[in-house]
Amino acid sequence: MNNEHLKYLLDQWLEKKITVAEENELAAYLEQHPDNEALPELLQHFLDNTAPDDVPFVKDREKRVSAILQMDRTAQQKANSEQSIVRPMKPGPLRITFLRRWGWVAASILLLLAIGTVVVRSLNGNKKEFHALTQDITPGSNKAILTLGDGSTVTLDSAGNRLIRQGVRQTGGQLIYDVQSTAISYNTLTTPRGGQFQVRLPDGTMVWLNAASSLRYPTAFTGGERRVEVNGEAYFEVVKNSHLPFKVKIGQQAEVEVLGTHFNVNAYPDEASINTTLLEGAVRVAVTGEKVMLKPGQQAQVANNGNGIKTINNANVAKVMAWKNGLFNFEDASLREVMQELARWYDLQIVYEQNVPDMYFEGEMSRDMNLLQVLTGLQKTGVRFRIEEGKRLVVLKQ
């Protein structure tokens, strides 16, 4: 492909006139030729002519692109070498790869084009019908319910900026406890499906709650420990205090003990296991009769039936932290896993017309996109959907 044709394809995308065939041609070329020396100039051309609203999922793109264009040949060769460690396609189930990293500049063009675009890799290469979608659902946002010690509730959202009661205030999507009270009561912060929220606990510890999650905690930490309870998913940045260990009760099966650390807990009841992933510091995960000490980068998996602890030495931290960073990370995710995550964030009921297709995905998408944008990208893989009233998403027969 000559550079004029490559520029034509980028222009077609920019003007939203690109066909599916042209889109696949562009993706295939960038995958095979990530080191094209003309790509930096074409990337700059694309940026100069793209309105910010066309790529809502890309943040600080000027800084991103500036860094990319200044990378030297060594960095580019390092990026290219990543191709050699891409996991080969497993035989049998269909695998789907989102457009991403095939060299610094090629990857950036693909990212700026649309993370939601996907490349289908199937064993038979058959094309699937594209099903038109018309209804749309907005993404999740900052919203939660605060249940106070007396049982009263306060509705929280991103617009709030108020004093809830003495020592407790809301600033946007964050709940802040300013003062250690001498009178202890227990509060519970609960996010619905389609919601997320942050809370700064009385000791300064920060907690981010994902959708469909809850955190129960005291209004003051007294005695010999700091203890909270979590259901669903939460990320903790714990303030270090060697005299007051921080303990997290996870559902009914496990407990995490820390002194000062950053870690993520995924404890949704509909998942196969409770996963604790350590990013910084050290934590001890305990279930009945067993304790495991984690190092940064490790993950402890506790089966929801409470049957022992499995330690993963090289956890996929980027995938674990994607939700907090505003992304869906579908690396090696089955269609059921993808639908489960979309259901929580967009507050959906998922229905399958037949058995769940045996498909796996690779790549990332922004959580800031409307559901229609996400589904339109997924439909290019051959999966078809129908949106019905009441936020019911039907996965159609393949």
Image: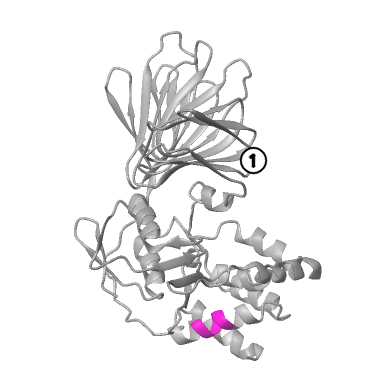
The magenta-colored residue range is 24-28
Quadrant of the frame with the N terminus: bottom right
- Residue at position x 38%, y 33% in the image: 251
Q: For residue 26: magenta?
A: yes
Query: Is the residue marked by circle 1 packed among few (<14), some (14-19), or many (20+) residues within 10 Å?
Result: some
Residue beneath disc 1: 296
Closer-to-camera residue (148/80): 80
Q: Quadrant of residue 244?
A: top right
- Residue at position x 52%, y 68% in the image: 51
Answer yes or no: is residue 19 visible: no
Closer-to-camera residue (122/12): 122
Q: For residue 162: magenta?
A: no
In x, y percent, where is residue 292? 57, 33
- Residue at position x 40%, y 69% in the image: 378
Q: Secondary structure at mark 1?
A: loop
Q: Quadrant of residue 237?
A: top right
183 over 376 or under it: above or below? above
In x, y percent, where is residue 392? 23, 58
As shown in the figure, which amino acid type bears the numbered disc 1? Pro
In x, y percent, where is residue 289? 48, 28
